[in-house]
Image: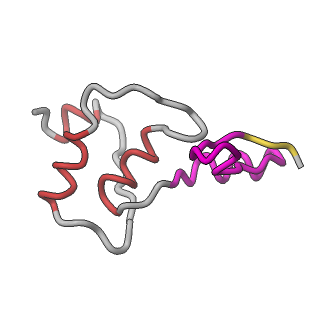
Amino acid sequence: MDSLEDFAHGRKVRVRPYGVRLDAQTTIARAESKVGESGYNLFANNCEHFAAWCVADQHSSPQVRDTTARAGLVTVSGCGGGRSRSRLCRW
C-alpha cells in the first residue's frame, strides 16, 4: 500500500466530507466486493459514485451533477424496463 505522500505525487489531496459514514470495516468490505467488476460509466458509475457508495451508501457524483447542470443536461435514473439505468436527457 502506498503512503499518502506517494499517492499524491506532490499534489494536494482533498478529503470529501460525507457526513454520516459507514464504519471502516464495512467501507473496506464494500470496496473489495467490487474488485474485478466492470461497468464504468462517466455519468452513471464513475470513481466518485464508487467512493460515495463505499463510504456512505450513496450513489452520487457532485462533479457529474455540477457539470451536467452547467451544460443544461439532467440525469434521469430508472428509465424503463424495470431495470435501473441512467442516461442523459437534454431538457
| In the image: residue 89, left or right of residue 19 | right
Q: Describe residue 25's horizontal placement relative to residue 10 as left or right.
A: left
Q: Position of residue 50 (x, y in %)?
A: 39, 45
Residue drawn at x 86%, y 43% is 90
Front position in the image: 13 or 74: 74
**91 lies left or right of 66:** right
Q: How many marks?
A: 0
Viewer-closest of 22 and 67: 22
Task: Please state the horizontal and vertical placement of residue 54, each as a whole percent of the image.
Answer: 30, 52
**What's the residue at 47%, 29% (across, down)?**
40
Outermost residue toward the bottom?
20
In magenta, the rendered stretch is 60-87
Quadrant of the image containing the N terminus: top left
Going 70% across and 45% down the picture, which residue do you hit?
80
**Magenta span includes 62:** yes
- Report whether 88 appears left or right of 14: right
The residue that appears at 12% across and 57% down in the rendered structure is 25
Magenta stretch encompasses residue 20: no
Residue found at the very far right of the displayed protein: 91
Q: Quadrant of residue 48?
A: top left
Residue 8, percent from left and from top: 28, 36
- Applied colour scheme: secondary structure
